[in-house]
Image (cartoon, helix red, strand yellow):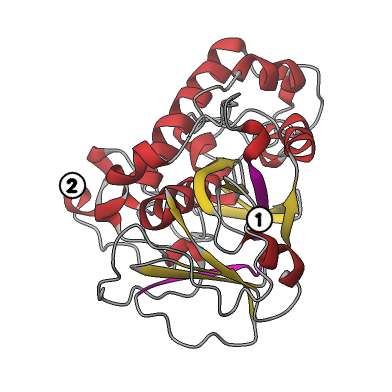
Amino acid sequence: MPEGHTIHRLAQDIAGRFGGRPARVSSPQGKFSDAAALLSGAELHRTEAHGKHLFLGFRALGGTADPGTAEPPWDTPPRQQPADTTGHIDDTHDAADAADAADAHDADGAEDTEDAEATAWVHIHLGLFGKVTFGGAPAPPPTDTVRLRLVGPTAYVDLRGPTTCALIADAEKRAIHARLGPDPLRDDPDPATAYARIRRSRTPIAALLMDQKVIAGVGNVYRAEVLFRHGIDPYRAGRDLTPAEWDAIWADLAALMREGVRHNRIDTVRPEHTPEAMGRPPRVDDHGGEVYVYRRADLPCHICGTPVRTAGLAARNLFWCPTCQRT
């Protein structure tokens, strides 16, 4: 399952390719056909992420009867663009366009009262098997596994296998936000809300960090790595975490995850622990990036040499160093 930084990056990338223009919307698989017919030809004017949830906001409902053949009036003529195709979302996106999309992407998700009533939201949760593919114009014929396809004048994007892909109203969207914890990547987070839950809980801190009702967007990699970086035993009860420790964890998560959005991968090692600085081989892993303990079970800790341990916790494999994480 992708971590929160990939969803925020995806929101930026979709905004950069489709924001401010009408889009042709279809559902070759058929499970989103009714909603696609309503949306096709409408302008995509907002994209937003909260934790592992993606929201696409369309300014008006197009009402097109045949979304597969609808031809909205493009603002600019189509131009050929090199294909940018991928499999899993973790491997999706061009790093060069992320900053350019910032103006089109409402990262903080603050309600725009002028546009709120005119917005129809597509709520997407990729889950374990969701995949996103980007490409340039012209779009090739879609396969029958594509749940949602957006086609613009210069690009297309395909969504396959999501846990959720649904057309929702503002009230439903607000309800989703309400049940999620603060997201370090949003502009409106309240880390005190998360700590209020943590300090009352006997649950291990490693499990609490994975609870999306406590903090949204943190996944298995970030929880293992941030606890290592702060020398915290993953089995320590949440109520034993001090305010200063929580403040440090939150600030570190925000910084690491923003770097994850920027570079579209997770790197958690400090400069003095990079392969170049330590004279060690670089990590070879499908997820990319340099880490301290994640997926390094039985390998020596980069800092102390103790074998990294692993165990199941919160339905995922936990990784930690029993020597560096004693507190």
In this rendered view, identify the residue nearer to me: 204 or 177. 177
Give SS at disc 1.
strand
Instruction: Say which residue appears at 67% left-offset and 66% top-offset.
Output: 36
Residue 127 visible in this rendered orientation of the protein: no
Q: In which quarter of the image is the C terminus?
A: top right
Q: Does the magenta stretch include residue 124?
A: yes
Q: Main secondary structure of the magenta part?
A: strand
Q: Does the magenta stretch include residue 173?
A: no
* Closer to viewer: mark 1 or mark 2: 1
Q: Which residue, given by chain and number where applicable, does mark 2 sit on?
A: 277
Please identify the quarter of the rendering in which residue 232 is found: top right
Start-end of magenta stretch: 119-136
What residue is shown at x 57% (from left), y 45% (from top)?
A: 59
Q: Is residue 47 above or below residue 297?
A: above
1 and 205: which one is in front? Answer: 1
For residue 41, which numbered disc appears in the image?
none
Residue 296 in the image: state x and y as whole percent: 48, 59
Vertical placement of residue 256 versus 13, above or below:
above
The answer to which of marks 1 and 2 sits earlier in the sequence is 1
Please name whichever residue, 61 or 316, is drawn nearer the observer in this view of the structure: 61
Would residue 64 be found to the left or right of residue 132 on screen? right
Number of residues whose C-alpha sits closer than 10 Å to that of mark 1, classed few (under 14), some (14–19) or many (20 or more): many
In the image, 184: left or right of 52? left
**Res 124 label:** 1
Q: Specify whether 48 is left or right of 128.
A: left
Q: Which one is nearer the viewer's eye here, 26 or 205?
A: 26
Q: Is mark 2 on a helix, strand or loop?
A: helix
